[in-house]
């Protein structure tokens, strides 16, 4: 059953986010821009800098660009859990592994 205005989805757990591979020259040429709101507050990062600081952020930003930019999309993003390593604290919920 699909209803476009209702979040009927489950939680998604992504592990080993630190092993993501970018093809081509995207590791150095792609740019992520944020702005603090102050004068001169524009901050530009490359995937190499983001991977060194917080590797799970690369996947979070990729998925955030794919979901709708609405209240429903923000609610769906709260159900995404990304972890850099293989371990995660959701073992009690007995998640099922999906191989692609």
Image (cartoon, rainbow, N blue to C red):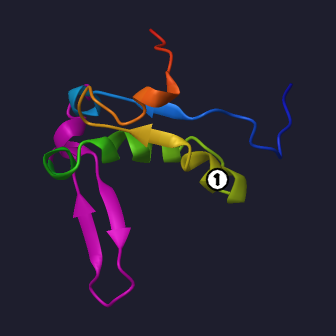
Q: Position of residue 13 (x, y in %)?
A: 45, 31
Q: Position of residue 34 (x, y in %)?
A: 35, 67
Let me know if residue 29 is in the magenta part: yes
Find residue 71 and report its image quarter: bottom right
Of all residues, the one furthest to the top in this rendering is: 99
**For this view, does 93 lie left or right of residue 60?**
right
Q: Quadrant of the N terminus?
A: top right
* Residue at numbered disc 1: 75
Q: Residue at x 69, y 34 (%)?
A: 9
Q: Nearer the viewer, residue 23 or 70?
A: 70
Q: Nearer the viewer, residue 72 or 68?
A: 72
Q: Residue at x 55, y 48 (%)?
A: 77
Of all residues, the one furthest to the bottom in this rendering is: 39
Q: How many marks?
A: 1
**For this view, does 55 lie left or right of residue 77?**
left
Find residue 29 and report its image quarter: top left
Mark 1 element type: helix
Let me know if residue 76 is in the magenta part: no
Q: Position of residue 87 (x, y in %)?
A: 27, 29
Q: Which residues are magenta?
A: 21-48
- Does residue 21 appear anywhere in the picture? no
Residue 88 in the image: above or below residue 6: above
Find residue 11 and report its image quarter: top right
Q: Residue at x 41, y 44 (%)?
A: 60
């Amino acid at each position: 059953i699909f209803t476009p205005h209702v979040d009927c989805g489950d939680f998604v757990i992504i592990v080993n986010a630190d092993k993501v591979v970018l093809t081509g020259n995207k590791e150095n040429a792609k740019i992520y821009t944020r702005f603090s709101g102050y004068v001169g507050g524009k901050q530009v990062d490359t995937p190499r800098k983001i991977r060194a600081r917080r590797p799970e952020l690369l996947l979070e930003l990729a998925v955030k660009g794919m979901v709708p930019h609405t209240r429903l999309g923000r609610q769906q993003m709260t159900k995404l859990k990304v972890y850099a390593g293989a371990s995660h604290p959701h073992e009690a919920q007995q998640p099922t592994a999906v191989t692609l």
